[in-house]
Image: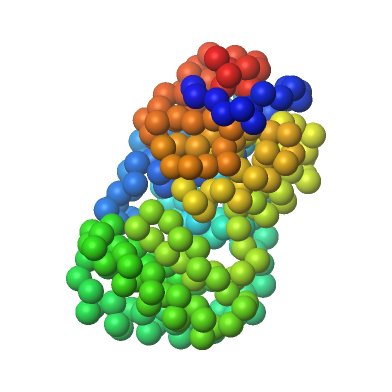
Amino acid sequence: MTATPAAQRADHGECSLFLDFDGTLVDIAPTPDAVVVSPQLRDTLCALRERLDGALALISGRRIDTLDGFFAPATFDAGGLHGLEIRMNGRLRAQPAEHRERLRAVADMLSRKIVAWPGALVEDKVQTVAVHWRLAPDLGPKMLEWLEEIAATLGPDFRIQRGKAVAEILPAYADKGCAIEAFLKQAPFAGRTPIFFGDDVTDEDGFRIVNAHGGYSVNVGQAKSAATFRLPDPHAVRERLARWARDFPGDLVADLKS
């Protein structure tokens, strides 16, 4: 695994593991519902959770119930919707949706108008709303301009989160770093060295929080990143996690450095 200079630091005891979903655990699909999760990946995560005494969580822009559908019948601790939902030790906590009605109006308007751009689609997540254009990459600049204009009408309570051929309108305070920080305050995650695997600009907040806590971050792909390590693609992530589940190295940080 490729390491960056920031990875030259001391190890700190046992680890907790945080995993992005799209583009990290699974290959990005043309549409959000076309993602495939193999039984082998589900079993790998279950085995790793046991190895880590429960200190494993998914950190995603997806809703937690959507993640559950991909991994059924297994369920995992998770931070969904960029931290607007947190499920820890089986207990779900969602941020108050005081702006939900304003987002509902935006989602309805986007759904009506998106038909003018074949290949683009709206994903309504109730507390956030995303527009995808992976099937029509040339639409990217137009979609971003459009969403920036809409977000501006909503005021400072909302922001645009860009991703790979997607942009999302969400409450301004929500990000994956805040989600990870919530886990780090509670058992079984507290007191452990955090490791976070992610692939996109949406994961950079998580990388910064993990790094600030003396942990280690793994960027999946070739984009410029604050991460301390890099893997080439989701296949490499799945191989690494499967090896850890099969033959747990004891010191995950040392294994990342090898």
Task: Give 192 or 188, whichever is nearer the viewer.
Answer: 192
* Residue appearing at x 56%, y 79% in the figure: 100
> What colour scheme was applied to this rendering of the protein?
rainbow
Q: In this view, does 234 lie to the left or right of 8?
A: left
Q: Is residue 157 above or below residue 182?
A: below
Q: How many marks?
A: 0
Residue 60 picture location, percent across and down:
52, 51
Residue 213 picture location, percent across and down:
74, 39
* Residue appearing at x 45%, y 75% in the figure: 148
Q: In this view, does 145 lie above or below 94?
A: below
Task: Give 152 or 172, whichever is nearer the viewer.
Answer: 152
Q: Is residue 168 above or below residue 197?
A: below
* Residue appearing at x 56%, y 22% in the figure: 256
Asked whether residue 77 is in view, the answer is no
Check the image and name the residue furthest to the left. 118
Residue 9 picture location, percent across and down:
71, 24
Task: Give 203 or 88, whichever is nearer the viewer.
Answer: 203
Q: In this view, does 243 lie above or below 82?
A: above
Residue 34 picture location, percent across and down:
29, 51
